[in-house]
Amino acid sequence: MYKVIPDAEITLEANPDDLTPEYISMLHTFPFNRISIGFQTFQDSILKLLQRRHTAEQAIRAFQNCRAAGFQNINIDLMYGLPGETLASWKEDLEQALSLHPEHISAYHLIYEEGTILWQLREQHKVEEVDEDLSVSLFDTLIGYLTAAGYDHYEISNFCLPGFHSLHNSSYWTEKKYLGCGPSAHSYNGVSRQWNVASLDKYIKGISNGTSVSEVEELNLYTRYNDFIITRIRTRWGIPLSTLREAYGEKLYTYCLHMAAPHLQQGALEFASGVLKLTRSGIFISDGIISDMLWVE
């Protein structure tokens, strides 16, 4: 049995169409204190293209019903770079999202995953990806709108009102250890990753028999260093140089600073109080910066 601290963040992720008044009332009898709702967009035509089961009106109503039920920590997920999206329609999405006053907003650029409906439509030339210039404009508008509204841009894709950053996701980004319980759940103890079997039947059988229900990957120094760079540089907390040197040694410390030097000179990275972090301009080329700083054998 594990003890749960009194103020633990307990999040439920849900689609808008699942959040009926009856379901929300039931949820409120459990210890959930944070709801994350997958809005994606307020454009009904795009929701239909994405084969989402909800409309914009249903999503708004679901949010309002969660608020009315007493939930005071609500995240909404948005997506941009969608087929047919324009800067004007993205601004409409942001204005609609802000009118709801959620405590947290996560916004991700669409990725065409192989095998998905959108990937197939793109291959059939029925939809087109947005071009790079529009992608940059959409992201720049996202940052401008949300920061002007008082949201803290604390991770590349995540924004929150003061005091409402996601404790769960922040644990991943700041190397905290975590335990995953249940099928497919992942755990991390600082030196290895572990993931449970996906099958519920096999998971229950293994627990009952006292046999292993997980696989383990031991992480060497260089893999842990790469994970540190990938997760830390994405956040406003950046890379504490003292932690980098102490945890990963002089060789990787020197390597990191050497690879960061061109980006410091170009103004994409900066030093601030012993921390290496992205500047506003660096956020737009963060993938390239991260790639340069990774250790490649």
Image (cartoon, rainbow, N blue to C red):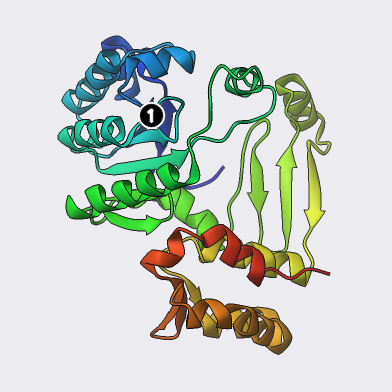
Q: Residue at x 44, y 35 (%)?
A: 81
Q: Position of residue 211 (x, y in %)?
A: 84, 36
Report whether residue 35 is seen: yes
Q: Nearer the viewer, residue 91 or 51?
A: 91
Q: Residues within 10 Å of mark 1 (few under 14, many from 20)?
A: some
Residue 62 location in percent, x, y?
27, 19
- Looking at the picture, how far across and down is residue 197, in whole percent? 76, 32
Q: Is residue 80 above or below residue 41?
A: below
**In terms of depth relative to the viewer, which is nearer, 206 or 33?**
33
Task: Report the residue marked by disc 1.
Answer: 85
Secondary-structure class at tag 1 = loop
Q: Can you say which quadrant of the picture contains the C terminus?
A: bottom right
48 or 186, nearer to the observer: 48
Question: Can you see residue 32?
Answer: no
In the rendered view, tell whether residue 152 sits above or below residue 63: below
Numbered marks: total = 1
The amino acid sitting under disc 1 is: Glu
Residue 16, percent across and down? 36, 19
Task: Indicate left or right for 281 with 24 as reference.
Answer: right
Is the residue 191 above or below the residue 21 in the image? Answer: below
The residue lying at 72 percent from left, 63 percent from top is 191
Q: Nearer the viewer, residue 91 or 1?
A: 91
* Quadrant showing the N terminus: top right
